[in-house]
Image (cartoon, coloured by chain):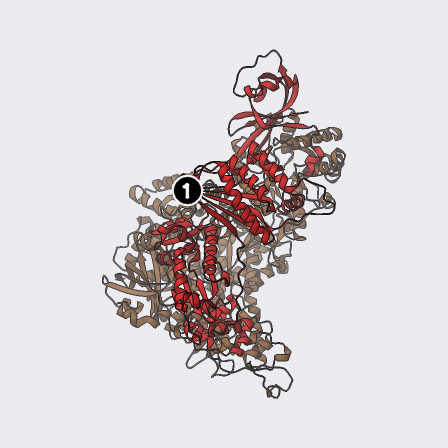
Chain colours: A brown, B red
Amino acid sequence: MYIELHARSAFSFLEGSALPEHLVDAAHSHQMGAMALLDRDGVYGAPRFHLAADKIGMKAHIGAEITSPEGWRFPLLVASRTGYQNLCRLVTQMKLRAAKEKGHITPAEAAEKSEGLICLTGGEEGPLAHALRRGGIERGIEAVRELCEVFGRDNIYVELQRHLSRAEETRNQAAVEIARKLKLPLLATNGVNYATEEQREVLDVFTCLRHHRTLATAGRLLARNSERHLKTPAEMDRLFADLPEAIANTEQLSSRLKFILSDLGYQFPRYPVPDGGTEATFLRKLTMQGMVRRYGAHNQRAYEQLERELTLIVKLKLEGYFLIVWDMVRFCNEHNILVQGRGSAANSAVCYALGITAVDPVGMDLLFERFLSQERGEMPDIDLDLPSGDQRERAIQYVYERYGKLGAAMTANVITYRGRSAAREIGKALSFDPETLGRLTSLVNAWEYKDAKDTLDRHFRDAGLDMHHSQIRKFFELCLKFQDLPRHLGQHSGGMVVCQGMLDSVVPLEPATMPGRVVVQWDKEDCADMGLVKIDLLGLGMMAVLEESLQIIRDDYGENIDLGKLPPDDKTIYDTLQKADTVGMFQIESRAQMSCLPRLKPKKFYDIVVQVAIIRPGPIVGKMVNPYLKRRQGREPVVSLHPSLEPILARTLGVPLFQEQLLRIAMVAAGFSGGEAEDLRRAFGFKHSEKRMKEVELKLRAGMDRNGIVGDAQEKIIQSITSFALYGFPESHAASFALLAYASAYFKCHYLPAFTAAMLNNQPMGFYQPATLVKDAQRHGLRVTPIDVTCSNWLCKLEPRDPDFSVRLGLRYVKGLRAETGECIVNERSRGAFTSIDDLKLRVPSIRKQELRALAEVGALNFIAGRNGFHRRDALWQVERAARNAGPLLETIEEGEFTTHAAAELPLDGELSRASTAKSPLQRMSDEERLVADFHGTGLTVGLHPMGYHREELRRAGARTARELQSMPDGVRVRVAGAIICRQRPGTAKGFVFLSMEDETGIANAILTPDLFDEYDITFIHKPFLLIEGTLQNQDGVVSVKVERVEALSLTRAETTSHDFH
Amino acid sequence: MAFASIHIPDFPVQAVVRMHAHLRGRAIALVDGVPPLVKVVAANPAAFAAGIQVGMSKSQAEQFTGIEIHNRSRALEKAAHAALLDLGWSISPRIEDHAPHEIVVDLAGLEALLGSHENIANEMARRAASLNLSAHIAVAANLDVSIHAARGFAGITVIAPGKEAARLGVLPIEVLLPSEDARETLENWGIRTCTALAALPTLQLSERLGQEGVRLHEHARGAGVHSLVLAQAETFFEEEMELDEAVEDLEPLSFLLGRLLDQLCARLAARSLSASAIHLRFDLGDLFEYEAVPGVAAPHVGKATEKIYCKTLTLPVAMRDSKLLLKLMRLQLQSDPPPGSIVKIALATDPARQRFAQTGLFVPSSPDPEKLELVLARIAKLVGEPNVGSAEVVDTHRPGAFRMIHFASPANDRSSRALRRSHGVVQPEAESQQYRPTTAFRVFRPALQVRVELRYGSPARVFFRGLRGYVMSASGPWRTSGDWWREDAWRQDEWDLDIRFDPTHTPQPTAFAAPAQKSNAAIAPTGLYCFCFDSVSQTWFVRGMYD
């Protein structure tokens, strides 16, 4: 029986066009018992190949094609674990020492690590074909002999491929002759590049991308035919009917390949324990110390929980893992890096005791099995949130230092072809012009909701492409075929793997684009699937904001705030939340959250936990939001799904809102163990299969039957579980987020200047644009002052002002100003104030004309010559002169006339200065011009809101302000106008569109029906200012307008921006 | 001294409207590009007002009601430009060809003939209207002022001396055509009109905008100093003749063409130029418009109302021998005669510099290019245009693919080879050099259709040139497929067959046997042939035989 032993997948990046699992599927359908994957210079696709094969009981052989210095490739198959380790080391060696795509391995290096590897002579890119091309059969014999010396005679197979090509057959005849002469075995392969014949088209497009050609100009670079698909054993038998031993040898060689990927030999690093103890005793000691700190010495419940968890941790041999995460948290704490564990780790009391998480799972009665269970046999997943930016990088570099360059690495992120990227690449190959491609790709919009008309076909027509044209049709087909194929390897945002010993013997390592980083060839999921322990060090914008807020408060207010000791029941915070005044607050600032807050009326911390979790697809799809809110408002009785579930659902008023609840429901209603319940969640989770879901559902029903839960109650429970498993939010996760939400609310309510400055310094992040954040802060009484080179730093900062602080915008908000220029300006200023624009230009010589213009345009140079300095046009006038290099001879000529006094006025140190402080002949900017300049130059204005300039005319048009709407009764007909700051069409809203409109008094919300949206879509999507008319809905303090009529307003040319399509 | 500037707004649109009078007054958008990627490139104010934007796709533009969408025509623009020059020259010999849509006419001395400046401007407008052009005309003592005023003011504008700055003042600075950088600076300064620009101090402006600032400032003040650059008369040579009686036969037509060609060549000779192409256009008394390009089959489709026949004679070397040109044109017309009687003849040339007599000291002697071209034209008449030239191998796996390229002079040939190299034509693989079979191969062009009987998937018997052959041994299939993204995708299996023919077999009168009867005697009793099966048409062919 033939076995395919030389196949490439799409993980050979542009040299294969099938996913590994599709190759496995094809091999399985051909009834092959095994198959080998040899991707180019790596084992990128090996985990997916192995797992897919393992699932159906097929044997997955691993290998790779390794590039030689001459460009041909060694096709290597792994026979043993040593062979695999050698292969990984060879790949790592070549990758780490060379630029991307440039590495190679010499025969001498291969010889050093040849144990456990079997080498084929290859197809047209193999060593034999290369030798035959260069020197005929004599050189071919020599090349095969060299291979025998490198890998040993017993590990060489002379490979034959038949793709119905005369030239290849000529080569085959030479190969057979060489094999006979050297007494080496023949081996038939098909040099597979794709699973099915149709995938040749994708490979041809890949070839064009690789060679920067189009299909029309690629000529013979394209495939000669479509014969490189995975052929059936019968087809291969027919092809090699004259050489049956070449077929028979495939089975014989397959039997020699003992290694499979589950035999990786990965070991998690051991933590160096002090004083001769064990990891287990050290972990126990740290945990118990933490327990006393967190719970006090006599909390029996906490003690029992910790004991239970520690027992399981020791049983699963995970002590080292917990210690290593603890060690990282310790490092962060010691270096003032804000850190917080989240995700399911917050279900663990051990994590809480060790200071990894800040949520008390005992107090909140969280389910430990959601984090760790014996049944699952999986590594736990601890995510650490760190401030995005430099602080997170410090934590990552600590891991590298601790475990060595070859002991730790980032996980990869496989970037796949999606709608836009695929369309762009295919369009290029089909010779479409860039402008059309740009238009097409921009039309592949990101609406979450897709209505029946929102098809790819429609996008094509919208882009002016005729679907009846054959090339366009082919373009369309290729776009579909490209979806999800790997494009290149990126670096995961925070996932790290560490290993006892050398990680490069477990998985090949590559240099990341970012200096100082090393990345493994597998993505996060593959690492988890292969049992590699992964720690996610995630950058969170809000953590950076909190950390910076703390720093600013320390520096400017002189107060030290401990985030762990914030007052838990701050009335101001809850009053603010109940009014939905939450712009800028973590997780509770979106329009949907704001529309829920006045109805939920949070009064205590747990309400924030619920608030964070309730506006999620799970509760929305499961129709849990309204019942919960009604029960909370006392408008509906609290009834549980079943009396036995009352204790589980009591905290959420009988409505399941969290994943932990569904796990407990399964445990109580159907008698599942904790691990079985977590399995259930996974069965319904993202990687669900129909078969597995059915099995679990049957088990669930059987359990409920046994417990006497039947009929409607059973159906309701099944319904809750199925809708929640996929989209539900874990309570522990919600609690971690709620802590951050509370902290952000605390800072906003009590330290608004510091919080605003920190928010502005960490953009982009959150839901709103900086322009909205500034306006919101101003409405709360904060004074925000404009950018000024005489006092602005690169970042926004506080300036003392009675009675509080004002925020001075930083130079970072000047569009087009480079960070190094900004820093240089600040440094120079610290040596002495600038006396003029010329002085600035002389002292910051690297500043460019466009940068000077940008500074002048936004008024940042107005006060450079004193407080009664220029207006913006004066500055723009001066800038044009300053930016022109007059040369030393004319340096002293001022404003067009030679000034004999100029030399006398020069500074004593002899420096030449063109102290041009004269006013310009230009007119001062009008309000409109200033507004346009502000938005064009900084994206925001600290002056009046654009709508404020037109209030009178808007009043004449009958428009109300956002604030006025708050006090108007439900059901009245209103008009309101504003700048659009957010457009949303959520997947769960059946095509309804939500608009947020801002004016000088606040934010108004509007809802559009799908029909109205269809009618006015261009107006809604493209017009920045709208006047809408409709019925006011004002219920429970939630105010919105149901739109019936819409009109675009032409108020200003200012380029306001909005946050769309989420 | 006075100058009149004539500015044609929305020039590409007007060029089209000029030829299609029924479009006057309609909202029009012009599209351009290679189908299906066709976009709006110009429109008139009515179309812009309706929502049309430059850059829209044709299908987007078609969604607007009441918009006439037409293809942009550079030929019509060229003709409109020529008409604009004609308009200028009809008034004065001293004109400046400022842009395709702008000319300046020196009015010196015209008052005596045509009256006041207003009268002259009115006369220009009248003549422009007679050419189906709507023009902005401005008269001023300063040449630049007249240009800027014509750009900025609609209709007729006469600016009295000394009033230049005041009149130009209201115009936007865009009429001065500042560079992008200067425009951005002026926009930043809030300078939007010529008045505002003129008010800036010159010296300080020059410090900021350099010489361009000075130029713009002068122009804004109406003080530009720009001498008239006289237009070179007629770089596009055209002659036309309207016939009193329609002509149908070639002989009288040749007589008329000869006269026109004599005139054209004489004009070319006077300017030391030759023709690199001759454009022939007939207005027909009936039938359709179509454009014929040598080498491409002329589609007999078009607008029945136009009744125009066009033909272009592209010459490999520039020439101006009217007799030779007439012979070439006659040969072209004989192979592709006009489909109806001719009522108007227009001949135009693309002028070019004269050909060098000697291309190089060591260039081997070759036929005189003019004579060679004449011979080729005669051959093309016999065998068809696409079948003349030198074969060039195409970079593709498609078996036997080649294209015919026009014979070129040795110098041109060298450059075309270099060009092909620079375009990345892939050279044959080294591998195939090493292992390519050395046997010679006779290609049958076109490949002959044959009948093949298969046994176990391999050819067993073939019916070929009226003979029956037995396949003694077969090698194959050698499979190629490609161009899957095009309509003419192919997939072929080639077989190398050792065939022994059956001498006793009596040929059957089959569709493919008949034409080959005569050559049966030449067929050897055995032979090694290359057969191929076209999977698309499900047909067997014999591609050729190995020697």
Count neighbours of disc 1 (C-alpha within 10 A) and say few if under 14, some if 14 to 19, many if 20 or more. Answer: some
- Of A190 and A135, the residue lying toward us: A135
Q: Quadrant of residue B328?
A: top right
Q: Amino acid at mark 1?
A: Lys
Q: A471 left or right of A987?
A: right
Q: Quadrant of residue A244?
A: top right
Q: Quadrant of residue A915?
A: bottom right
Q: Is residue A237 above or below residue A351?
A: above
Tell how many labels.
1
Residue B66 percent coordinates (x, y): 33, 52
Label 1, secondary structure: give it: loop
Q: A498 left or right of A1016?
A: right
Disc 1: which residue:
B307
Residue B250 percent coordinates (x, y): 49, 36
Q: State the quadrant of the N terminus of chain A.
A: top right
Q: Is residue A228 visible?
A: no
**Parent chain of label 1:** B
- Of A699 and B181, the residue lying toward us: B181
Q: Is residue A99 above or below residue A162?
A: below
Residue A586 percent coordinates (x, y): 42, 63
Residue B361 percent coordinates (x, y): 74, 47
- Of B65 and A299, the residue lying toward us: B65
| Residue sitting at the far top | B504
- Of A1017 and B126, the residue lying toward us: B126
Q: A505 left or right of A147?
A: left
Q: State the quadrant of the C terminus of chain A.
A: bottom left
Q: Is residue A870 visible?
A: yes
